[in-house]
Image: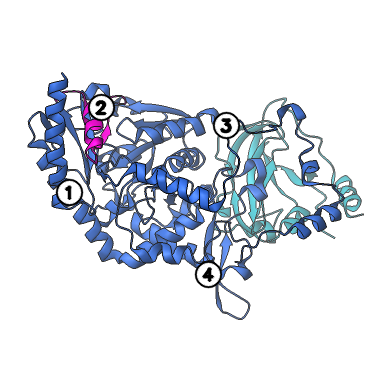
Chain colours: A cyan, B blue
């Protein structure tokens, strides 16, 4: 069973959201998602300054088999795309909740958020999908 | 890979398996009102003997004229071995070989093609080809929008000295995707795109500029200055080149003085072993730098090793193609032109670097002879003075169209009439000579032109 850290929030499309102390959020894909994709060979992250709506494609994760979109779970302005992934896309496989983060953004004030799940809810979703 | 059509029994078996009564039923989802029941104007089928006879009669009607038309398609000598090898059964399917285990030969050939084209253009990577030069310009523009992430404008500068057909195809293909193609004027004195015509764009958000070398008029642009200017303003450089000319000219990968070179290089591969055949099929090529490879449309064949360490070839970097990415693919019109690429690869292998250089040098020499000979005819002069590759613009003292008609009657296709597309030039004709034209061919043209000018005077 894949790793689902209790302190993060999750989406139906297998992104995770971490709220940082400075009010920004960090976004990545879950352990389950990276396992399903297989070895990543390329990750395309957004440029700082891009303004995103909820559900907008914000990054592309590419394995040898397929290139898939990552959707922004939160509206806001990108403050940083993970610069380390250009040289080391496999960090998303090896450390999806750490070194493998995709982007950070500053949520729009009063901005919309996708229906986010708790770790327990996401865990349940994975169990349902596996069944 | 063997190409064996289905037998009637195969078709029956397949239909039975999926539970469909006939082929027609597969098209049921197309509303009846949209279906064409018969094709008006298309006659009933002919047998092989009849069609052979009809076609040779039509071919005879064309005669065997001396062709001095270039304007994007160029007559070069094609060694007989090129198409003898290309049409071998092993190569004679244009379909993309997805099954590496069944198509190592084809895959290796595409790999060699990519290596040759990348080396010729001075770039890191080549795709496995595109439809033609015009669609390659459209694809390069779309790619520039994806790759030049600092630019948000979708504005592409396309000088009027770029092949006008390429401009039209780029607008038709990419115009509906929000790209805006903006004309840049050329100098009627030099036939070149001057830097001062670009200066007004300095400081604006421009995604890319298209630079053709040699340009549509055959003239050599100051590609270094334009490349440096574009890069200084965050603008991508899309180079459009004639592959034959690259045997003599500096490759786009080395344009400019900063060592950065062009960002994307495209062109029509027809001069490399593909006959004129009334305009096609040809193939387009595209190369880029490694940092933009994932934004390049189409596929790449890579060299790898199998589990036992033996060398092999396989399709690689196809994760962004339409069979995987659907609507989000880098392109949905990036079929590679396999058979023509096969011919081009064999052509380049047979010619070698030296052969290609001699072809380019001989073409240039013959074009200079042609231009000198024609400009000695009264009422004809060169339009521009600068260096050219193997075609140039001539100005006449009277309309060109009747002269071309008269020349055609004398077995000479005299060139491409520019007056409709470039009326500001006056009575202008674009002429071309390659290594296929002898001095006596050029003399025949001069004699025929003398006669044609005489009868044009009499007609006037």
Q: Read off the magenta span.
A: B397-421
Question: On the picture, is B208 further left or further right than A80?
Answer: left
Of tags 4 and 2, which is closer to the observer?
2
Picture residue at 10% right of the left edge, 42% below the top? B372
Gap between marks 4 and 1, in whole Å? 41 Å
Of tags 4 and 1, which is closer to the observer?
1
**Please, what secondary structure does the residue beneath circle 4 have?**
helix
* Circle nearer the N terminus (3, 1): 3
Q: Which residue is mark 2?
A: B401
Question: Which of B233/B130 is in front?
Answer: B130
Gap between marks 3 and 1, in whole Å? 41 Å
Q: Which residue is mark 4?
A: B105
Gap between marks 3 and 4, in whole Å? 42 Å
Q: Which image quadrant: the C terminus of chain B?
A: top left
* Label of residue B41 in the image: 3
Q: Residue B9 occupies which quadrant of the picture?
A: bottom right
Q: Is residue B320 magenta-colored?
A: no
Q: Which residue is mark 1?
A: B441
């Amino acid at each position: 069973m894949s790793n689902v850290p209790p302190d993060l929030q999750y989406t139906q499309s297998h992104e995770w959201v971490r709220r940082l102390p400075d009010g920004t959020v960090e976004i990545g894909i879950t352990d389950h998602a990276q396992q399903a994709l297989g070895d990543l060979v390329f990750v395309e992250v957004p440029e700082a300054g891009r303004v995103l709506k909820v559900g907008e494609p914000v990054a592309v994760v590419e394995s040898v088999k397929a290139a898939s979109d990552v959707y922004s779970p939160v509206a806001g302005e990108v403050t940083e795309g993970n610069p380390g992934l250009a040289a080391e896309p496999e960090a998303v496989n090896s450390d999806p909740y750490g070194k493998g983060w995709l982007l950070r953004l500053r949520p729009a004030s009063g901005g919309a958020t996708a229906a986010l799940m708790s770790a327990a809810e996401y865990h349940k979703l994975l169990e349902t999908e596996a069944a | 890979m063997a190409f064996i059509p289905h037998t009637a029994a195969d078709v029956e078996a397949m239909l039975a398996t999926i539970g469909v009564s006939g082929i027609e039923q597969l098209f049921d989802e197309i509303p009846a009102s949209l279906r064409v029941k018969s094709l008006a104007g298309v006659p009933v089928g002919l047998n092989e003997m009849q069609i052979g006879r009809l076609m040779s009669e039509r071919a005879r009607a064309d005669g065997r004229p001396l062709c001095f038309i270039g304007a994007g398609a160029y007559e070069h000598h094609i060694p007989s071995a090129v198409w003898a090898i290309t049409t071998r059964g092993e190569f004679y399917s244009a379909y993309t070989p997805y099954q590496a285990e069944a198509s190592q030969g084809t895959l290796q050939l595409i790999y060699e093609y990519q290596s040759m084209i990348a080396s010729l253009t001075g770039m890191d990577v080549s795709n496995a080809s595109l439809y033609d030069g015009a669609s390659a310009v459209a694809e390069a523009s779309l790619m520039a929008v994806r790759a030049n992430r600092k630019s948000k404008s979708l504005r592409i500068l396309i000088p009027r000295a770029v092949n006008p057909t390429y401009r039209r195809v780029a607008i038709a293909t990419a115009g509906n995707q929000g790209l805006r193609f903006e004309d840049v004027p050329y100098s009627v004195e030099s036939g070149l795109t001057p830097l001062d015509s670009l200066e007004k764009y300095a400081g604006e958000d421009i995604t890319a500029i298209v630079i053709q070398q040699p340009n549509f008029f055959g003239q050599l642009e100051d590609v270094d200055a334009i490349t440096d200017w574009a890069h200084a303003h965050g603008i991508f450089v899309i180079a459009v080149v004639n592959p034959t000319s690259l045997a003599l000219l500096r490759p786009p990968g080395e344009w400019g003085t900063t060592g950065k070179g062009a960002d994307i290089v495209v062109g029509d591969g027809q001069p490399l072993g593909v006959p004129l055949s009334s305009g096609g099929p040809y193939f387009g090529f595209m190369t880029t730098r490694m940092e933009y490879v994932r934004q390049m449309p189409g596929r790449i064949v890579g060299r790898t090793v199998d589990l036992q360490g033996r060398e092999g070839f396989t399709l690689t970097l196809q994760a962004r193609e339409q069979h995987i990415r659907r609507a989000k693919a880098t392109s949905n019109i990036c079929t590679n032109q396999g058979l023509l690429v096969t011919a081009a690869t064999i052509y380049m292998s047979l010619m070698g670097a030296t052969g290609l250089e001699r072809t380019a040098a001989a073409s240039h020499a013959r074009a200079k002879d042609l231009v000198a000979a024609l400009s000695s005819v009264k009422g004809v002069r060169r339009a521009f003075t600068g260096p050219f590759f193997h075609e140039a613009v001539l100005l006449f003292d009277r309309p060109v169209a009747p002269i071309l008609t008269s020349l055609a009657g004398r077995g000479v296709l005299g060139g491409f009439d520019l007056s409709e597309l470039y009326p500001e030039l006056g009575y202008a004709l674009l002429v071309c000579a390659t290594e296929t034209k002898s001095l006596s061919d050029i003399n025949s043209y001069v004699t025929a032109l003398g006669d044609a000018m005489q009868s044009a005077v009499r007609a006037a």
